[in-house]
Amino acid sequence: MAKYVYFFGDGEAEGRGDLKNLLGGKGANLAEMTSIGLPVPAGFTVTTKVCTEFYKNDRNYPAGLEEEVNQHLAKVETLMDKKFGDTKNPLLVSVRSGARASMPGMMDTVLNLGLNDETVQGVIAQSGDERFAYDSYRRFIQMYANVVLDMDGDILEHILVKMKEDRGVEEDTALTAADLKEMVGLFKNKVKEELGHDFPMDPKEQLWGAIGAVFGSWMNFRAITYRRLNNIPAEWGTAVNVQSMVFGNMGDDCATGVAFTRDPSTGEDYFYGEYLINAQGEDVVAGTRTPQPINKAKHQPGDLPAMEDVLPDCYQQLDKIRDILEKHYKDMQDIEFTIEKHKLYMLQTRNGKRTAKAAVKIAVDMVAEGLISKNDAIMRVAPEQLDQLLHPSLDPDAHKTVVAKGLPASPGAACGQVVFSANEAEEAAKIGLKVILVRVETSPEDIHGMHAAQGILTARGGMTSHAAVVARGMGKSCVAGCSDIKVDYANQQFTARNGQVFKQGDVITLDGSTGEVMQGQVPTVQPELTGEFGQLMEWVDGIRRLRVRTNADTPHDAQVARDFGAEGIGLCRTEHMFFEGDRIAAVREMILSADLEGRKRALAKILPMQKGDFLGLFQVMKGLPVTIRLLDPPLHEFLPHTDKEIEALAAEMKVPAQNLKAKVEALHEFNPMLGHRGCRLAVTYPEIYDMQVQAIMEAACELVKNEGFSIIPEIMIPLVCEVKELAILRANAIRIADEVVARYGVEVTYLIGTMIELPRAALTADVIAHEAEFFSFGTNDLTQTTYGLSRDDAGKFLPFYVEQELFPTDPFVAIDQEGVGQLVKMGCELGRKTRPDIKLGICGEHGGESSSVKFCHRIGLDYVSCSPFRVPIARLAAAQAVLEEL
Amino acid sequence: MAKYVYFFGDGEAEGRGDLKNLLGGKGANLAEMTSIGLPVPAGFTVTTKVCTEFYKNDRNYPAGLEEEVNQHLAKVETLMDKKFGDTKNPLLVSVRSGARASMPGMMDTVLNLGLNDETVQGVIAQSGDERFAYDSYRRFIQMYANVVLDMDGDILEHILVKMKEDRGVEEDTALTAADLKEMVGLFKNKVKEELGHDFPMDPKEQLWGAIGAVFGSWMNFRAITYRRLNNIPAEWGTAVNVQSMVFGNMGDDCATGVAFTRDPSTGEDYFYGEYLINAQGEDVVAGTRTPQPINKAKHQPGDLPAMEDVLPDCYQQLDKIRDILEKHYKDMQDIEFTIEKHKLYMLQTRNGKRTAKAAVKIAVDMVAEGLISKNDAIMRVAPEQLDQLLHPSLDPDAHKTVVAKGLPASPGAACGQVVFSANEAEEAAKIGLKVILVRVETSPEDIHGMHAAQGILTARGGMTSHAAVVARGMGKSCVAGCSDIKVDYANQQFTARNGQVFKQGDVITLDGSTGEVMQGQVPTVQPELTGEFGQLMEWVDGIRRLRVRTNADTPHDAQVARDFGAEGIGLCRTEHMFFEGDRIAAVREMILSADLEGRKRALAKILPMQKGDFLGLFQVMKGLPVTIRLLDPPLHEFLPHTDKEIEALAAEMKVPAQNLKAKVEALHEFNPMLGHRGCRLAVTYPEIYDMQVQAIMEAACELVKNEGFSIIPEIMIPLVCEVKELAILRANAIRIADEVVARYGVEVTYLIGTMIELPRAALTADVIAHEAEFFSFGTNDLTQTTYGLSRDDAGKFLPFYVEQELFPTDPFVAIDQEGVGQLVKMGCELGRKTRPDIKLGICGEHGGESSSVKFCHRIGLDYVSCSPFRVPIARLAAAQAVLEEL
């Protein structure tokens, strides 16, 4: 006989962690926790097979299911020592859906199922808290009416709102037990009025209603759409989890808490967590009460009493569980627990989120402890996270005026102008301002502002509050629960502990590692890369195949990148040099010249400066490869655009404003991204690239002559769409380069190659490779053209696309492997077909994003190039790519 | 022994027309003409093999070559009854290069070779014209010094210019025999001064010098570059053609002329040509003298004497040759001939250029005459040429004031403002003005202006003048040799025969079919498609597989297209409807609405108008398929942009100008081509497409209800880059469409598909096909994105690219088969893989260009769609594509 229901509880489970297909993700996880001996509230899982058969048999349950459910329910009753529907000591359960992967649009959760007018009396008796009992009851009715009975959620919510108005209170918590009892009555009447039948009072009827609602939701419109968009077959089905409720808010012998098996901020190996007596789980994370530490390991004077002292038995049991968990999952765990009348229940365990510092330390420590291998350690650190480690922290010697202190919720220093809303933060960031977002507490609606801000400061909430968790995920500095400050939204200001007032726009500095809030800007120092970091990167470099270069235009950036492990420069953008200092004057003179001679005169002024730039870069890179991209942007980018700016420049250049204006107008483009730029400029004005090639080669020759070492410059011609462009410009470049080399009489070799950044270049890469010794995939522009999407304009709809999951991620952040990536792959294959030893790299911003780096590894690129601070990320991702292939 | 030299002359040739690889194009052609019995001036071809061996053997000629050349030269002497280097009756020769395909950068021609201080006396004796003899001599020195001795052409030209100054004359022709004799001396001295040795006086030395120069030019820089860019192997080599000179300007028993075996303008079957007594070939085409007709077939009172009367023997011989040529080449020929002292020589024959009308008539006539097959006839008409037949001509009933009459050089009516230079023509066309280019005569420097103009009017030149030939090729109206007008460039005006003055900007009308020039604008009528055209298109339709639809947004355009044979609408651009009349007000109201309700209110106003549009189109198309593209352009295109326009609109709409301006600024895009448009608009504002789908379906339903016939609307969603966009919008469209159909209670089916116009769409077409019942390739935008080239901005460099042959043609005119075409092909294959019966078409402007249409046929599209006037072109190209496959 088929088995449809799997039990878990009291250290024994019929399922296992690897039975996700049968039990769904949630069910498998509950079985796993139970089977390793954790005190999980007992329950059972109705399998995905039931769902599949349900739909196969015209929405009928398989024979025997009801009996199996009843048997398992009885077992739960026995274990929990409660009875479903009992008026003295009733068992309440939660019902949750659980597919293989969590799926929006499906019924989520019904809590407190089993309550009715009789069983609520039992809860009152057990808890001694009538208000708690009726609050649970009215919540149950609300949830059940909405998700099971399919009533519009606003209908009952409106009754609640109205009652608060009538009572003249603002918070739900201000309603009394009597109020809530009355509300239960009102809810039940309303349900009858709306649906034409009574709210079900029979707990079994409630249970089957909820199970049916889970299966029904598998075929609702949103779920079907989601599956279609994500290629999930309908046959997978969903499971249903029925689990006994436990309560941490039934009195002072109850508690609830969250903990990490190691410190998620530093990675230190001690048991780190918070709890609250007589509370529900949501009270801990919501930040409405300040939680207490679970142990005294880091106790400081003034801290609230630790669980270790208050509930020592439970603490000891929990500490043992900590050990079991780390040995079993071989990773730091994030756990939720509840204590109901001195009895400990584990509600959840999962791999804990952590800071980069913690991730690195935990991974390296666990290798030392023999828990995991070096390869495991490499896989344990999310490459993007490293970003947190690579940014500056406060200069310890700097003078600082601390005006408040909160919790060190997410490490790193941040400095900026104070703003008080997420929208303001976003607006300010758009115009290039650095801001600190200050809130009483944050919520999911604030995410975009947190993204835009340098750091986050909240007045309320603990280390596991929304602000703290999200900021750590983002690698942003965060000081949370800073009760020293009083936030006054109405007046757009906050007051520090000494009464000092900070208005919107005032500058403050946060230290997310200490929790300190300082007035003004405090100097910072470069991050000290800890021993664990160095150790991990050593393992990483031992394993990766992909080289990592950097995008750098200045000796300073080049040096930073080398310190981070860059193995060359993959993209030096020469136009950045055109903007600097007085060269922009010469550049403008060139653009305004009416003829070739005039342009050449102006270019001759730029030549020595460009040469100096290249010399500087070459000296830093000491023999490592340096790829230099010749001028790329359209000429109008070097000219002003408003009438006022034009007039000012005309006066400065001593030319009639009318002439300058006419030139600006003549150069105007409707779509500059697709305009007269890149090699197209050089086809019409070859003298520009001639000057640049001369500067590069003279610098390289002088290096050999004066410094005694050599580099191989890689001269890169951008925006090629047709091989003939490259053929002509390459012939020119060779002519100039060979002239310079002959003139200096030294040995310097050089390569000439191209960016592959237009679809046509990728599609015809076999032909282009005849004229190119290397390809560098410019995936920024390639993404723009492949999608037909202007990065500068996409802000109006791209966030919506990502949010609605039309795009899995922003294609400018992670390379679109299906479309853009297909072109890159094609370009590689075609290029190698013509020239087997062609050098292949990528220099778009994707070169520093881990999924993109891994893609580059898989398609066989030689190197990626990224901004200096992302070099370690790319190194780590490149190593993970190797391991993922095993 | 290897044979290196091939003789031709006196009806016998050692070579043949199909020996192009060995003899080069020119040599093979001369051999062919000779062997079919034409009196070709005798000569010989040094083969391409010599060139190849020359380079293989370190620039040494193969053994025996000199002897072979001498033998053949002697044979030429015998035949021509002249002797090379003779002082009494010298043989002069031309030396020309001739590779398989003509190649820029190579040595072209040296004429009159064999002249020196002694042989010039023989020429004087033979011609009795000392001036002619010395003019030939000085031209020879100039040419030889430049192309063989590699002297800068300006050096000798400068002596010529100075002498004209000294003599106070402007034209070369004003110099006397004595002047020219003196010039020969000056030239020789200058050559010695520049090169350090005498100009070679030995004719044999001259000959070998010229042969060596041809071979040498095969390896010069320009030729090498050209070969590399065009994939021509160096091994091909070039041949050298040495041919005896003949002169039509040695007295009144000499003549020269050009002729067509049928009328190139109408296609009528009579011998059509012009000649001049005592003249050189260039005199006929230059238009400096007005040529005389060769026969009296179309003689009109006042015409100059015909060759038929003046040189009857030669004419009879020529008329026989005409017959031989048509029987041999089975096509109308364009011939050049010269009569030297009553002896007829054929210098050239080639397939004659002709008007579309002539091409069609000749092809159809030749089928009737049994010369060619129907399939041959189809291949004989260049599809692009048909354009000429499809445009309006003057309304015969219209009142017209003829102010001048010239030659009917290229048919069709044209009307526009007078301009006097090619540059002005181009400038005016850029801002949308229609112009008539008026010149004394045209030259190759005027091509761009002729392109830009509606028509061309010249005061000088015959039916074979530059203006006439080029205009016919372009399908532009042209009146040539209009001696009624006096052109005054200095005052930017021309005077007509009645003394009436036309200034720049005055409007005139040309009738290129009658030669009439009229003042003002004269009404036109639609072209009457002649019987031959109808016959040809009947053959065409019998053979083609590809369907031809039209791009049309109005019932009028749709009707024109149907009359031209369109089989449906492939692209109806709904945004054009948004601009019309008072709907633009509603569109603006929608854009300015702050919320969904406001937008819906405004859209409700547009709905009935859109519905009316669709009804109109459906009624014209009577059951043929109609593809309707939903709104595509970014919203800012519907708003004004200058402050002044914004203020005016704000006043009209009664909204604050500030609000309107803010909206315009908010909608501004850096790269609108890649911006918030197409389906992206509908993802953010679904209500727009909802309205359009409702309008389409209501129109379709009303058609069934009221007219009793049905069409299948094809609803097309533009700018999809990701299947999820299409999935969402398609689901919406189905919902709306099914609602409408249910409401009307009729049977209407519809298709939903997408444009494939972004590289990513083509690359992921297999996935997209799951949501699309048809694809229409939007190759305009696909070309822009694949090349990264904005059509609006490319004017700054694209013409240069085409001129420099970086691009073989403008990729917006003919589809780039290598890059863009590869994506289209990929899109087809992937689409069919997922959905074998998917409908595939193209709706970019390429759909009406013949090479693109043929490409579409080859890759298996179901249809092309093009503008109404190009429908016959596409039909013809589609048929040719079938024949080219055989």
Image: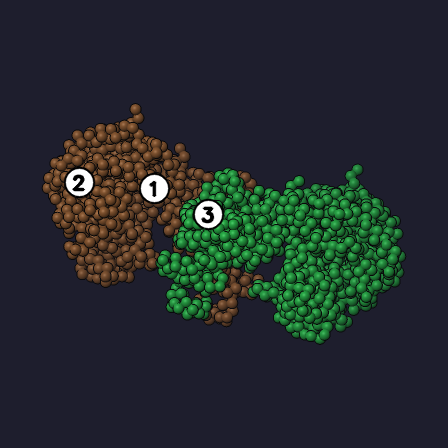
Chain colours: A brown, B green
Q: Chain of mark 3?
A: B
Question: Would you say A647 lies left or right of B567 here?
Answer: left
Whether B51 is drawn above or below B392: the answer is above
Question: Looking at the image, is mark 3 or mark 2 nearer the viewer?
Answer: 3
> SS for tag 2?
loop
Both labels 2 and 1 in a single chain: yes
Q: Position of residue A234 (x, y in %)?
A: 37, 36
Residue B173 in which image quadrant: bottom right
**Where does label 3 land, which residue?**
B746
**Where does label 1 land, which residue?**
A220
Whether the residues at callouts 3 and 2 have beta carbons within 8 Å, the answer is no
Q: Position of residue A314 (x, y in %)?
A: 15, 36
Quadrant of the drawing holding the C terminus of chain B: top right
Question: Would you say A104 lies left or right of B582 here?
Answer: left
Tell me which amino acid carries mark 1. Asn
Mark 3 crowd level (few <14, some 14–19, many ≥20, 10 Å Cα): some
Mark 2 crowd level (few <14, some 14–19, many ≥20, 10 Å Cα): many
> SS for tag 1?
loop
Residue A644 in which image quadrant: bottom left
Quadrant of the drawing holding the N terminus of chain B: top right
In whole angstroms, how far apart are the C-alphas of marks 3 and 1?
Answer: 29 Å
Both labels 3 and 1 in a single chain: no
Q: Position of residue B198 (x, y in %)?
A: 78, 58
**Where does label 2 land, which residue?**
A116
> SS for tag 3?
loop
